[in-house]
Image (cartoon, rainbow, N blue to C red):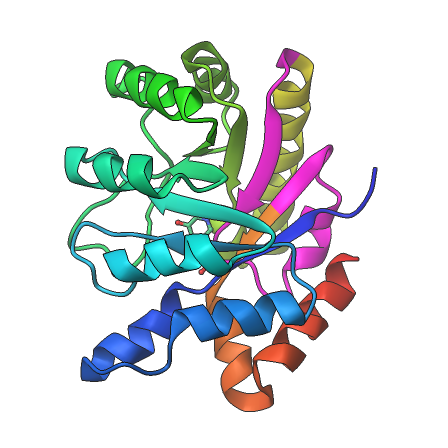
Amino acid sequence: MSAALLCINIDHIATLRQARGGVYPDPVEGALLCERSGCDGITVHLREDRRHIQDRDVFALKEIVKGKFNLEMALSDEIIKIAAEVKPDQITIVPEKREELTTEGGLDVGKNTKKIIESINLFHSLNIAVSLFIEPDEKVIELSKKCGADYIEIHTGTYCNAVQKEEINKEIDRIYNAANHALKIGIKVNAGHGLNYSNLKPVLKTPGLEELNIGHSIISRAVFVGLPEAVKEMLKIIK
Ligand code: PXP
């Protein structure tokens, strides 16, 4: 199996821009630099509160991203409409709470089944692949498959937050078991959230891992070494 793809989440370039409400730094320029530095795709999350990425960013990125363009979004009617217009290569459906700092926990597929199925059908009719951001849990993986998702994105946040060795090992095993189960029932495996230069290596051994979505750590590293170098350092670990 070849190395996982690296899709860089550039939300936090927009976070810096929105801090002053101006025009820089521009996430579109960031996407160009990331791709020139060798990453495989670009990910953004269009949040309902528009705290970082704005609608115009998503439309502009669709035009300039050469690799995979992955749009993360919650199932709100307003965002679904925008996504259907933009037509990214992939949509990753995430849960969203207004007050959270970042996405907390995976999607509750059991509670939102009808809306998830309807949205997957709509996106498939537009040739958009759909991934569901979920906890590494067999039942949720089976539900995701039943809903017709092409991919699951395994939420790596609990693993990344673990401190004690035992807890870290337990969480990495959960990720591996979840991936094996997904492969067994025929659903592809992505992973992301909280991954950085120090905790990534064990995640790379996830069975069948196709794609990593990594943002905060790369954009943070870029503050000190520049975006091209930060991207190259991450690629060196992955490839
Ligand atoms: N994957 C999903 C579904 C996310 O919501 C996020 C955060 O927007 C990421 C990956 C990237 O997480 P991080 O910024 O912690 O690398």
Quarter in which the C terminus is drawn: bottom right
Residue 214 at what x, y percent from top left?
Answer: 53, 58
Q: How many labels, in total?
A: 0
Image position of 190 with respect to 51: above or below: above
> Is residue 171 left or right of 16 when viewed as pictured?
right
Residue 199 at what x, y percent from top left?
Answer: 63, 60
- Asked whether 197 falls inside the magenta stretch, the response is yes
User: From this viewpoint, which residue is outermost toward the front?
Assistant: 63
Q: Which residue does the image show at 44% across and 42% down from the upper left?
A: 88
User: From this viewpoint, which residue is outermost toward the bottom?
Assistant: 224
Q: Does residue 121 appear in this view?
A: yes
Quarter in which the N terminus is drawn: top right
- Asked whether 160 falls inside the magenta stretch, the response is no
Image position of 139 with respect to 237: above or below: above
Query: Picture quarter containing residue 190?
Result: top right
Residue 70 at what x, y percent from top left?
Answer: 47, 46
Q: Which residue does the image show at 20% across and 59% down from the upper left?
A: 50
Query: Picture quarter containing residue 205?
Result: top right
Q: Does residue 197 appear in this view?
A: no
Q: Which residue does the image show at 40% across and 19% down from the upper left?
A: 125
User: From this viewpoint, which residue is outermost toward the right?
Assistant: 1
**Segment colored magenta:** 185-211
Query: Picture quarter containing residue 120?
Result: top left
Q: Which residue does the image show at 25% across and 56% down from the upper left?
A: 55
> Is residue 11 left or right of 171 when viewed as pictured?
left
Residue 93 at what x, y percent from top left?
Answer: 37, 35
